Amino acid sequence: MKAGMEQGEHGLMEQLEGTLWWYAGLHANVLHAIGKYAQRTDKLLDAGCGTGGMLQRIGARYPDVRSHGLDLSEYACQAARTKTGALIVQGSVDALPYLDKAFDTLVSLDVLGYEMDVDAAVAGFHRVLRPGGVAIINLAAYQWMLSYHDKAVGQSRRYTRSEVIALFRQHGFVIRYSTYWNTLLFPLMVLQRKVLGSDGRSDVRQISGVMNNAFKFCLSIERLFTRRALPLPFGGSILLIVQRPTE
């Protein structure tokens, strides 16, 4: 994950992914999706696991799951091993080093926006999932929102909901649910990234506790809709739940 990120960005991610509002919302979405859509989760892969924050949350919620992670960054892999105890492999998501039908559940969060063979990555997701297995995908929304933040973290591609649905259908997946999220705060995101600008650093940074809690509250309101499988019409990110058909 985060092929273009430098060690400094990974270090900042490691420092903040347990507390920052955006990670809190992302992790809550994924944990709920595992519980709702992945009826069997004996063996799970986080394809692009970063420094291990999501795997750590999954292990705490589902301690019996055998968790695996893969990331392109050696620094991130070591951090994830230390943090989670999961089996972490260094490698690229567009060349997954796993056997066919090896996993019940696959998680891949904000990975397919980086420079890679996206079709090979999605085909690999399908290959390593067992029939009936579920993939939980998060992606940055709207190419027109590409900004200093994406450049700072090495990301070059953002998506619309319809583009993501078409991509995964093309590779044989069935769509279970898809939605934009980070909707209530999206106008602020547009203002910051497209009007005000920044100092070139990513938006993954420490903010005041009051603001952090307020942003968390906004995301909690959105989850009243997404947990009822009601899609939100726009937002800064896309959540996609897909399934490999049973054979």
Image (cartoon, rainbow, N blue to C red):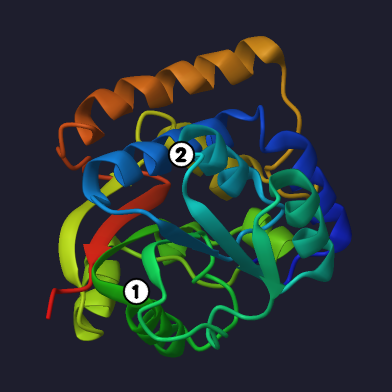
Quadrant showing the N terminus = bottom right
Q: What's under tag 1, amino acid-wise?
A: Leu
Image mark for residue 62: 2
Provide residue 199's location: percent of width, then percent of height. 80, 46
Q: Is residue 225 left or right of residue 151?
A: left
**x, y percentage for residue 134?**
29, 62
Q: Report the amino acid beneath label 2.
A: Tyr
The residue that mark 1 highlights is 129
Q: Is residue 188 visible?
A: yes
Give above or below for 195 relative to 88.
above
Residue under the image location 47 percent in, 44 percent down: 64
At x 30% / y 57%, what residue is drawn? 240
Q: Nearer the viewer, residue 13 or 59?
A: 59
Left or right: residue 74 versus residue 227 is right
Residue 198 seen by the camera: no
x and y percent of residue 106 in the render? 41, 63
Residue 173: which quarter of the image? bottom left
Q: Estimate how packed mark 1 is, as few (under 14), some (14 to 19) or many (20 or more) residues with alpha carbons within 10 Å.
A: many
Image quarter hosting the C terminus: bottom left
Residue positioned most to the right: 8
Is residue 19 shown above or below 43?
above
